[in-house]
Every structure is written in structure tokens, then in C-alpha cells.
Amino acid sequence: MNRLKVLMFLGCVAASAPGLAQWAPGSPRSSLEDGNATVADLRYNYSAGNSHCGDSGKPPFLCSGVLMRVTQRPQNPGAFRIWDPSPTSARSGGTSFSYIRYDARFRSVAWGFNDGLIMYPQDRRPAGKDLLMVQCAYSMDGWNWFRNTPCGTMVYEGVVYPHSRPCQSQGVTTPQQWLGIWYQPAKYRPLNQCGFDMRRGVANSAGYFMLMLQMKNILAAEGFSEQNELVVTTWPAGRARTLPIQAFFYMPVGVPAHWPAGVPNGLAAARLNQKEFRADTGIIVPIVRLTPPANINDHFRFDFIVADQAETGSTGVVPPKPVPGRCPRYIDSVKWGAINGNQWSLEIKPSACTRTIAADQTDLAFQELLNKAGSDRQWSNTNSMRRQFVCLLTTYRTKASWFIEPHRPYVSHEAAVKANCNP
């Protein structure tokens, strides 16, 4: 089905402008107007057929498709917020999402859950929203809870599955090679699945992402049976106001027919999520009904229904509440410079407040740095950049400028300190 037909199928025939934001105090339009605009934007992103987002190093998920994560409400109300990292994600450093687009369809989502959240495409997020980094992508469920690191090698019942390491690292660049690994003998087929490295700076990451989508379609009914998986670098807790959440979603119970019996009501959960998010941030994120495809030729459907909304708002100015104990700003400025002719160095001028922070605000400071520089073409090797940043923060707090460089290797904190933060 081509893109025009998909647009007509979804009831959306016009492109929407990027950078739509949720309703917040002082918004020029009501939350209901914003909800209708949001669902139009989701339909547009779903129908987009980008094979890249400007060049071969910018995969389609940066500017098209819908990045979604299923969530589960706490059994004890108020125990946690569903948009904060789970304990497992916080420990591992990776958080699982799925990616849907007209050429990336499946009938069910992780764990059989029926509600969650949708993030903006990275390059289409509104101003002031955090940059989230995709580490890798799997055509099917990546079973990352059995991998030694996010996107790493599978270890199951004491057995190491070497073919499960990143596809590019073992020369898997064609459908035939991927299938050859997928069909290797194993107790469970996903144990051999390799994922595609999507980190900044990886050559031809756009082409490999398209290969990931292609493999799901080549698997036909098997591919349609379960979700794909994208692993995103885990973000700091407590950043609800700047997380790039575009919508909360729910799936109607009983659709499709195979839906597990007795699952909690997704709409009730979405309403609670919406209410808590407004209470914490003052922002109303719209609730969208997401109907999965009934068969392999069907499509996801997005609907904004006024009666579904637990929170609505019109216009009016209310100043945002400061967060106690946090810096109002962590990074004053950043600037790239060339060294040795062909390598890059990032000069960072931290705020005065940043020079006094403890370990509990390190993630917040680095997230602000990512927001300022992580989308730049010079940025790569995020793990090493973070290691250098933390080393400088803990060792050279009073220096006027800090310099970190993407060409430097990732080492332990102790090794970085020994190398004066320039390993």
C-alpha cells in the first residue's frame, strides 16, 4: 500500500507541521484543539515513507514513524510514575520501545499490555524537550532482559549465543545473512536474533534500519505476530516536564480478537496517567486511542476522542513551578572546534550551579548537554562523551571550560581520572 493510500485509509490527507506541543498554561489553543492536531501529526508520521532523515547516517526514526512504549500502572497508587525509568531500565541503561509505521506493523505489543506513551520523533520534538538516543533496533522482540548489556550478546540458561551480538559487528548486511542467523538451531528462535547498531556516528545506520523493517515484512505472518524493539538510552528520572512525550495511548479491550482475557482497562490507566502528568507538570498530554491491525493487510489507527480525556484546559497563564534542589540551568554554552585537522572537540561552559552538584544530578546535567549538542553531526560515541563529562565534573569542577572529544575510547571512571579525563 503506497503512502497516499495509507493517508486516505487513516483519514489524513494533509501534512502537519512539526513541533506540535501539548497544552500548557498559556497555550494559544485549548487542549482539545491540541489533541486533534496531535492525532493528525501521528497519522502523518505513521504514513511517512522516509528511508533516511537527510543522509545515510540519519535513520528514519529521527523524523518519521511512531515510537511507543507500553507501561503498567503501579499496584500501589503513587508508588512511581510510568514515564520514569523502571528499576530494570535504570540498572541496565536501556529502555525498550516499539516502532510503528505503515511499513512496520504487528498485531500485539509487549507483554500483552494495552496502554503506554508515545514519544515525538527526535528531529520533530518541540523546543525545550529532551533528546533521547536510540542505541539499537530489532526486527522482532529483542529479549533484552537476557542480554549481557542493552543491545549486547544473549546469555540464556548459562549458554552464550554469539550470533545475537550486533548485526554489523558480524558482517550481517543482507536479508539472507539475517535469516541465516534467525533460523540457527536454538531452544527459542529469538535467542539468535541480532540487532542493528543505531548509535550516532555508525555508518549507513539509515540503510540498516530499513533492513530491520524489511526483515519483519519478509517474515510475513511470523513477523506480524509480535512487536519489534528499539532500545533507547535510559533518561534521568524526574524530568517529566521536558520529556518528549507526544501522547498517552490505550488500546480498546477486545481488539484484536486474540487479545488476552482479563487485561486491565487501558483507557482507565491512560486517564490516570494524564491526570498525574498534569498534576506534576501543569501540562495536558492528549490521550489517543490506538487500534492495532486486525490482520497482516490492516493498519494501526489513531483516534482522538473528547470523551476519553480526563483533563481538559483552555487558555490562561500560570507560571511554571521551580523544582527544589535542582539547578535552573546546567550548561551555559557549548561550542565545537576542530583538533588535529580531522577530529572534533566540544567546549562546555558549565553553569556556576553545576560546579556544586552531587551525583544525584549528574544524569540531569548530561541530559541538558545532550539536548544542546547531541543532534550535531560532530556528536558520536555517547558513552565515552558521558564518561569524560562526569570525570571533568568530579575532578575539574572549577575550570572555566571543559573539553570532551568523541574520538576518545570508553574506559572506566578510574582509568579516565588517571588519564586526566582524556583517555
Image (spheres, rainbow, N blue to C red):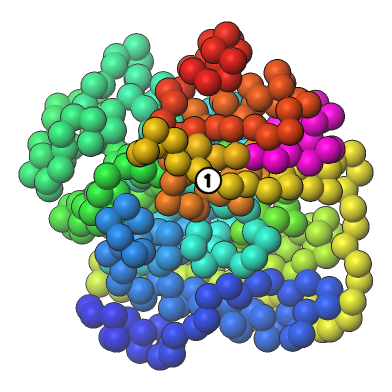
The N terminus, quarter of image: bottom left
Residue located beneath label 1 in the image: 336
Residue 354 position (above or below residue 247): above
- Mark count: 1
- Residue range of the region highlighted in magenta in the rendering: 348-365
Residue 315 position (above or below residue 269): below
Which percent across, then down, holds residue 61? 40, 59
Q: Is residue 328 left or right of residue 106?
A: right
Q: What residue occupies the far left of the structure in this picture?
A: 176
Could you tell me which residue is drawn at 58 percent across and 20 percent down? 421
Using the image as rendered, state which of residue 52 and residue 55 is in the foreground: 55
Which percent across, then down, holds residue 225? 30, 53
Give yes or no for residue 8 being in the magenta stretch.
no
Residue 115 position (above or below residue 184): below
SS type, badge 1:
strand
Give yes or no for residue 356 being in the magenta stretch.
yes
Residue 236 visible in the shown view: no
Which percent across, then down, holds residue 106? 34, 59
Could you tell me which residue is drawn at 43 percent across and 90 percent down? 14
Name the amino acid type tagged 1: Trp
Quadrant in which residue 50 is drawn: bottom left
